[in-house]
Image (cartoon, rainbow, N blue to C red):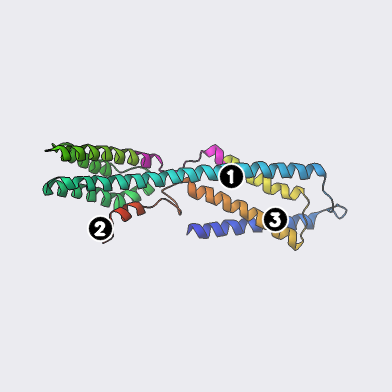
């Protein structure tokens, strides 16, 4: 099932549940029940619960968005550092340039074609990707510079490979959900309490009140879905992509 279809069904389900509860409650309500007035304390408590829950939702969205942005930056940094390694190798002889280019292409192709899927399914980096990066490091490290220009490029290449390794490890650290289970518990319970307080306001089954109650519950459902989707930077619908690698290594698109 598509995640967007699941979102639509969840939002529609939230609306239907709220509307159904309102209708059932109205039908079973005491004929002498006064629904025209609500005690001031209930209105105050409902307002405070809504404000507190809105703050919690905002913090949760900001947290998962920051994690996703950090993961995207790590991918961009990894791809850019690999591109710089290949560019710095231009001052070396052709045989060494070809070796470096082959190592980089092999690593990037593996990341794009294989490792990304492995990250989604197994929740970890692939050992083969680590070996390919180690091969690139070894091939560069064992090449002795022959002049000052090669010496400068050699040190820069080693620094960039270290950057690739660091970005790769950061990418591995961002695999999987980042939101603690206790936070999810608070978000879900808070949503139930916030929506439940609508009934304490003695809402009736007028079209205006039903539309507002349904829209409010659908909005909370959408925000929870957004947090859930961003919570796993590499494993869900709006996940981090391999586009930085494809942009810097256009030969992969051929």
Q: From the top left corner, tell me how far across and down residue 33 is, in percent.
A: 85, 52
Spatial CA distance of label 2 from label 3 is 53 Å
Numbered label attached to residue 213: 3
Q: From the top left corner, tell me how far across and down residue 64 is, in percent.
A: 50, 44
The residue stretch that appears in magenta: 169-184
Choose mark 2 or mark 3, whichever is in front. Answer: 2
Provide the residue designation for mark 1: 58
Magenta-drawn stretch contains 225: no
Q: From the top left corner, tell me how far across and down residue 184 is, in percent.
A: 55, 42
Spatial CA distance of label 1 from label 2 is 41 Å
Q: Residue at x 51, y 59 (%)?
A: 4
On screen, 52 above or below 109? Answer: above
Q: Nearer the viewer, residue 99 or 119?
A: 99
Q: Which image quadrant is residue 78 in?
A: top left
State the SS at label 3: helix
Q: From the top left corner, tell me how far across and down residue 43 is, in percent.
A: 77, 45
Marks 2 & 3, CB-CB < 8 Å contact: no
């Amino acid at each position: 099932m598509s995640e967007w279809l699941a979102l639509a069904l969840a939002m529609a389900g939230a609306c239907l549940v709220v509307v159904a509860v309102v209708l059932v409650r109205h039908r079973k309500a005491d004929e002498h029940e006064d629904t025209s007035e609500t005690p001031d304390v209930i209105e105050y408590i409902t307002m405070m619960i809504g404000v507190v829950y809105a703050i919690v939702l905002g913090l949760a969205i900001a947290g998962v968005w920051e994690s996703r942005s950090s993961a995207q930056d790590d991918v961009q940094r990894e791809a850019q550092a690999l591109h710089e390694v290949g560019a710095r190798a231009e001052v070396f002889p052709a045989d060494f340039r070809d070796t470096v280019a082959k190592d980089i292409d092999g690593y990037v192709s593996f990341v794009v074609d294989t490792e990304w899927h492995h990250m989604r399914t197994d929740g970890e980096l692939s050992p083969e990707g680590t070996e390919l990066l180690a091969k690139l490091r070894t091939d560069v490290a064992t090449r002795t510079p022959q002049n000052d220009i090669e010496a400068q490029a050699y040190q820069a290449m080693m620094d960039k490979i270290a950057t690739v390794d660091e970005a790769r490890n950061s990418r591995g650290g961002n695999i999987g959900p980042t939101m603690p289970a206790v936070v999810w518990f608070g978000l879900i319970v808070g949503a139930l309490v916030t929506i439940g307080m609508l009934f304490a306001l003695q809402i009736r089954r007028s079209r205006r009140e039903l539309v507002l109650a349904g829209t409010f519950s659908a909005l909370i459902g959408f925000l929870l879905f957004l947090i859930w989707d961003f919570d796993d930077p590499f494993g869900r619908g709006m996940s981090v992509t391999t586009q930085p690698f494809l942009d810097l290594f256009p030969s992969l698109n051929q």
